[in-house]
Amino acid sequence: MDTDFVSTLLLTGKLAFMTTLCLLIIGMWVSYVLAYSKSRLKIFFEALICMPVVLPPTVIGYYLLVAFSPHNALGKFFKNLFDMRLAFSFFGILVASIIAGFPFMVQSLQNGFHSLPISYRETAYTLGKSKMVTFFKVLLPNIKPYIITGVALTFAHCIGEFGIVLMIGGNIPGETRIASIAIYDEVQICNYSVANRYSLILFFISFILLILIYSINKNFTIGSKV
C-alpha cells in the first residue's frame, strides 16, 4: 500500500472531521441567534456568512493568507502567544476550511430552526424551562434532519475544497497536502492512475453523503405528512 496515498487520505479525513465538528458546535449557536434575532444587523451577518459561497476561493484564500502572515495582527497574535504559524500549516487550513464551510452548516441549521412552530419555544418557557434547556431538549431534537444535512454538506464540501487550502497551506506532504490537491499534482505529472484512485474515493464519499441527505429529507417529509 502506498504510504503517501494513505497518509493523504487520512489527512483529508482528519481535516474534514475536525472542520465539521468545529462548525457543528459553532454553527448551532450562530444559526440559533440568526433564526430568532430581530436585529437590523441580521441581514448584514447573513450576507457575510454566505460570502464564501459567491466569492472565488482564491479571493478568500488571498485575504486569509494576508491575515495569517506573521507581519499582520492575527498572525503575530498566534505566533507570539502560541508560537504557532497559521500560514502553510494544518491549523491554518483548518481555520480556512471552517470559514469556507460556514454557510453550509449555518444555513442548514437556520432553516431547521425556521421550520419549527413558535409554540415549541413558548410552551417550554411557559413550563419554566430555561433557554439553554429549551435549546438542547426541545429545539435541537426536532431539527435532527437539518443537523445531519448540515454535517453531510459540510463534510462533503471540505473533502473537495481546493483553492482556499492551496492558497493557505500550499502543498506540504503530511501537513497540508489533501486529496484534492494531490489529484491536481498527479494530473500535472501525468500520473493518471493515482489521480483516478483519489478521484474515485472522493466521488463515492460525496455520492454516499448525498444519498444520505436525500434519504433523510424524503423520510422527514413523509413523516411530517403522516
Image (spheres, rainbow, N blue to C red):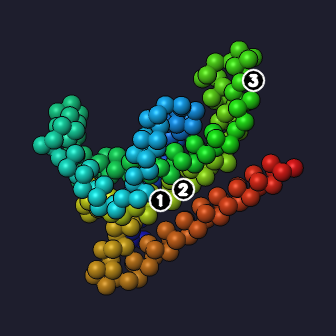
Query: Where's residue 139, x and y in %?
Result: 67, 33
Q: Are marks 1 and 2 in contact (CB under 8 Å)?
A: yes
Circles 3 and 1 in contact, beta carbons < 8 Å: no
Give the camera-side residue of 70 and 67.
67
State left or right for residue 214 relative to residue 180.
right
Q: Can you identify the residue that label 2 sits on?
A: 153
Q: Is residue 45 left or right of residue 133?
A: left
Assess disc 2: are there few (<14), some (14-19) or many (≥20) residues with their C-alpha within 10 Å of its C-alpha.
many
Q: Where residue 173 sits: x, y (%)?
A: 28, 62
What number is the disc on residue 80?
none
Residue 29 vs 167, above or below: the answer is above
Asked whether the viewer can see residue 213, the reply is yes
Residue bearing mark 1:
157
Q: Earlier in the sequence, mark 3 or mark 1?
A: 3
Callout 3 secondary element? helix
Spatial CA distance of label 3 from label 2 is 32 Å
Q: Amino acid at mark 2?
A: Leu
Q: Position of residue 57 (x, y in %)?
A: 34, 60
Q: CA distance from mark 3 to mark 1?
A: 37 Å
Pointer 3 residue: 123
In the rendered structure, which amino acid carries the disc numbered 1? His
Left or right placement of residue 42 versus residue 166 in this view: right
Quarter occupied by the N terminus: bottom left
Picture quadrant of residue 174: bottom left
Query: Farthest residue toward the right?
Result: 226
In front here: 110 or 182? 110
For image coordinates 58% across by 44% down, the residue present is 109
Asked which quadrant contains residue 35, the reply is: top right
Q: Residue at x 24, y 56 (%)?
A: 62
Residue 102 in picture, x, y percent from top left: 45, 47
Kindly identify the residue that appears in the image at 20 percent across and 41 percent down: 75
